[in-house]
Image (spheres, helix red, strand yellow):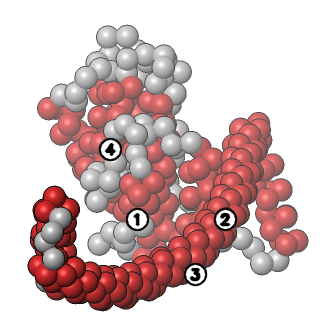
């Protein structure tokens, strides 16, 4: 935030306009005890001009339920246009918030606040930012962004008061309707509106002055800041725990990756050994195949040579037999065996010549 914007959030300029009557009396024409119904309450709230308009109790049968009537809406529209700095809406919501869990008037006060925001020129643009129910962090920031929008037509002298009232309206709505924790809102307002003093002594003096000015309410503020500090400590502790868990997870992942890398190296070495064994076996098979082929060729050549010699010797025997056939029985048996040998040897020789097919 710029110094100019920050200065608009600080300072001693009051946000509320001085309460006056037609005769210049600074006191309100209506008192709290004069409020009997919604019409008198609306007049009372706007006559307070940004001061507290809380009620000690909600009048029974005063119409503080449901939607605003058409006549009351017109009244609020007219009075809101006279609320130049937009100071009344937040005070109305404060008043209703006090009775949120005590009566059924809370929805009516919310409707009255919305109508004030809708009708007051100083609060233009805020209605679209306020929503019911839970709200996200992004929506909270959008509400603050809407509060900081410069309203057209506002005199420079009134810019600070208008901005502060817009911020107050947003903050009270976020706290009372959206249930945003007070410490969180204090933190956001501090970050976006308040700039710490550079002079520590001056800052300490101003802090003490502000606390003493609060009186008995200082205890509530102290509690809120303690909750804010406790929340910050819890968040810091949670962040440290998350950081520790992430570091442990990172170390565990690193160890697991290292182990897996080592296992992968072992697997690669085993695969290399198996590849070498397969190559060796393949070479051995090729060598065995070549040796078997050589052996077969040698056996084939030797058998062919022997068979040729057997056939030659058989031919010589048969030739001798043909010359002397005196022993007919011997000759008959010899002739029969010779024919068989001749046939078998010839058959084997043919197979060898054809490559064993």
Q: Residue at x 79, y 59 (%)?
A: 207
Residue 278 appears left or right of 253? left
Disc 3 target residue: 3
Q: Residues within 10 Å of mark 4 (few under 14, many from 20)?
A: some
Instruction: Judge depth for marks 3 and 4 and give the one in front.
Output: 4
Q: Is residue 145 above or below residue 100?
A: below
User: Is the residue under label 4 in contact with that under label 2 (CB below 8 Å)?
Assistant: no
Q: Residue at x 39, y 26 (%)?
A: 106
Q: Which is nearer the eye, 117 or 12?
A: 117
Q: Is residue 340 above or below residue 133?
A: below
Disc 4 target residue: 131
Snapshot quadrant of residue 174: top left
Q: Is residue 28 above or below residue 10?
A: above
Instruction: Judge depth for marks 2 and 1 and give the one in front.
Output: 2
Residue 252 appears left or right of 5? right
Q: x and y percent of residue 192 in the render?
A: 55, 66
Instruction: Judge depth for marks 2 and 4 and give the one in front.
Output: 2
Q: x and y percent of residue 151 in the render?
A: 33, 69
Q: Residue at x 68, y 59 (%)?
A: 252
User: Is the residue under label 4 in contact with that under label 1 (CB below 8 Å)?
Assistant: no
Q: CA distance from mark 1 to mark 3?
A: 17 Å
Q: Secondary structure at mark 3?
A: helix
Q: Residue at x 77, y 78 (%)?
A: 198
N-terminal-most mark, 2 or 1: 1
Disc 2 target residue: 259
Residue farthest toward the top in the current orientation of the protein? 60
N-terminal-most mark, 1 or 4: 4
Q: Residues within 10 Å of mark 3 (few under 14, many from 20)?
A: few
């Amino acid at each position: 935030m710029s110094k100019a914007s920050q200065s608009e959030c600080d300072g001693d300029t009051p946000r509320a306009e001085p309460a006056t009557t037609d005769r210049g009396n600074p006191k309100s024409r209506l008192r709290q005890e004069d409020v009997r119904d919604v019409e008198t309450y609306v007049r009372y709230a706007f006559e307070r001009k940004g001061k507290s308009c809380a009620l000690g109790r909600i009048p029974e049968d005063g119409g503080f339920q449901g939607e605003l009537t058409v006549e009351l809406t017109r009244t609020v529209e007219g009075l809101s246009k006279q609320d130049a700095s937009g100071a009344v809406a937040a005070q109305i919501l404060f008043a209703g918030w006090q009775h949120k869990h005590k009566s059924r008037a809370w929805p009516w006060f919310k409707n009255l606040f919305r109508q004030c925001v809708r009708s007051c020129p100083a609060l233009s643009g805020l209605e679209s930012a306020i929503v019911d129910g839970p709200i996200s962090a992004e929506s909270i920031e959008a509400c603050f962004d809407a509060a900081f929008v410069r309203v057209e037509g506002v005199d420079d002298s009134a810019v600070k008061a208008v901005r502060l009232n817009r911020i107050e309206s947003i903050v009270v709505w976020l706290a009372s309707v959206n249930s945003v924790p007070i410490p969180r809102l204090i933190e956001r307002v501090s970050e976006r509106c308040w700039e710490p003093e550079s002079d520590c002594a001056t800052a300490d003096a101003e802090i003490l002055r502000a606390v003493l000015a609060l009186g008995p309410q200082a205890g509530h503020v102290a509690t809120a800041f303690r909750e804010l500090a406790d929340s910050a400590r819890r968040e810091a502790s949670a962040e440290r725990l998350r950081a520790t868990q992430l570091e442990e997870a990172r170390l565990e992942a690193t160890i697991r990756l290292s182990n897996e890398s080592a296992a992968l190296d072992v697997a690669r070495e085993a695969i290399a050994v198996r590849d070498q064994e397969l190559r060796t076996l393949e070479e051995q098979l090729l060598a065995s195949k070549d040796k078997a082929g050589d052996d077969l060729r040698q056996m084939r050549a030797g058998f062919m040579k022997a068979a040729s010699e057997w056939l030659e010797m058989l031919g010589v025997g048969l030739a001798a037999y043909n010359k002397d056939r005196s022993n007919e029985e011997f000759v008959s048996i010899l002739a029969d065996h010779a024919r068989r040998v001749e046939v078998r040897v010839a058959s084997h020789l043919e197979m060898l010549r054809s490559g064993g097919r």
